[in-house]
Amino acid sequence: MRDERSLQPWTRGPFELIRHADSHARDADDTSRRIALIGFDQAIEVAVDVFVRLDPLQRGQRQIGREEQERVRLNFREKLAFLDRLAAETGRPLGVSVPVMIFYHQIRNEMYHSGNGVTPETRVVEGARAAAIATFNALFSEDIEPMLSSPRSSGEALSGRAVQGALPLVSPSSTSGSTDRTEAATLLLQALVEFEDEIRKLMPGSSVGSLKDAWGDYRSQHPELASTVGREVTQALSFRNEIVHMRLDLEALPADLLLDRAIVVEEATRSIRRSATQWRDRSPR
């Protein structure tokens, strides 16, 4: 089994951030969970910054222009958009939903704005840990899970189920005036997580990195199913890409619009489930 001594020197910074956060994640007190969440979130930012500044020889000859480097280093959302593009270009799924990562980062920001008023739940810290490890692996092709002293099963967090239950599922009744923008944005992110999971389930074992390409592959194989839900899925994919690639600013949209989009995404998810079940029931056994 490889140990940390085998890591390339330029990966040491992100690795140490993850390891330090991991040491706090093992503690049950509120302060340790806050430190752990911030550390895992920061490790994702640092790992992407390190990767884009490497010489092409150090990152598999991948070319990244100066303009793209500067854009990616600008903020966290640009970094996630870069990770999403990298997964699509390499054909290797990141292994963690970008909307989930936005959700964890949003909680970190809420901690900053509210001082000590927000303490992340253990499942949120676990999910942020899994996201940091997945990011490190995607960028540097190193599985550091065995190198950490507190191995955990990260499958649940990576699938997005760590987010489910944080807020109720979106429904028309959720559009009451009492819903604020932060809650509405979280509902939209949660709906997108479930939408991503549903499409990935359609193509188990697929090596396609892009969610759009994964849906395209499935649609070409099952045109009779895709034709019944194509409009809803196309619209939901558009919303998802607007958020991930920063063409839509969650901070600037009113709660009502965020809820409207969340409902559309959830309806696309329901349509996929319903149509897939009907198609399986009609298939010869």
Image (cartoon, helix red, strand yellow):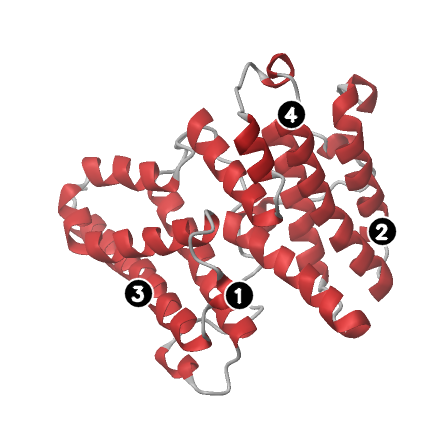
The numbered disc on residue 251 is: 1
Q: Nearer the viewer, mark 2 or mark 4?
A: 4
Give the secondary structure at mark 3.
helix
**CB of mark 4 within 8 Å of CB of mark 3?**
no
Q: Whole-percent x and y of residue 245?
A: 45, 47
Earlier in the chain: of badge 1 and badge 4, it is 4
Task: Report the Cα–Cα distance between label 2 and label 3.
Answer: 39 Å
Farthest front residue?
A: 67
Q: Is residue 189 visible?
A: yes
> Which residue in the protein does label 3 denote?
267
Q: Whole-percent x and y of residue 163?
A: 56, 60
- CA neighbours of label 4 inside 10 A, class few (<14), some (14 to 19), many (20+): some
The numbered disc on residue 160 is: none
- CA neighbours of label 3 inside 10 A, class few (<14), some (14 to 19), many (20+): many
Give the total of numbered labels: 4
Q: Amino acid at mark 1?
A: Glu
Task: Report the Cα–Cα distance between label 2 and label 4.
Answer: 24 Å
Who is closer to the viewer here, 28 or 233?
A: 233
Against 75, is 73 above or below? above
**CB of mark 1 within 8 Å of CB of mark 3?**
no
Against 233, is 31 above or below? below
On screen, residue 36 versus residue 210, left or right, reads right
Task: Report the Cα–Cα distance between label 1 and label 4.
Answer: 32 Å
Farthest bottom residue?
A: 177
Give the secondary structure at mark 4.
helix
**CB of mark 1 within 8 Å of CB of mark 2?**
no
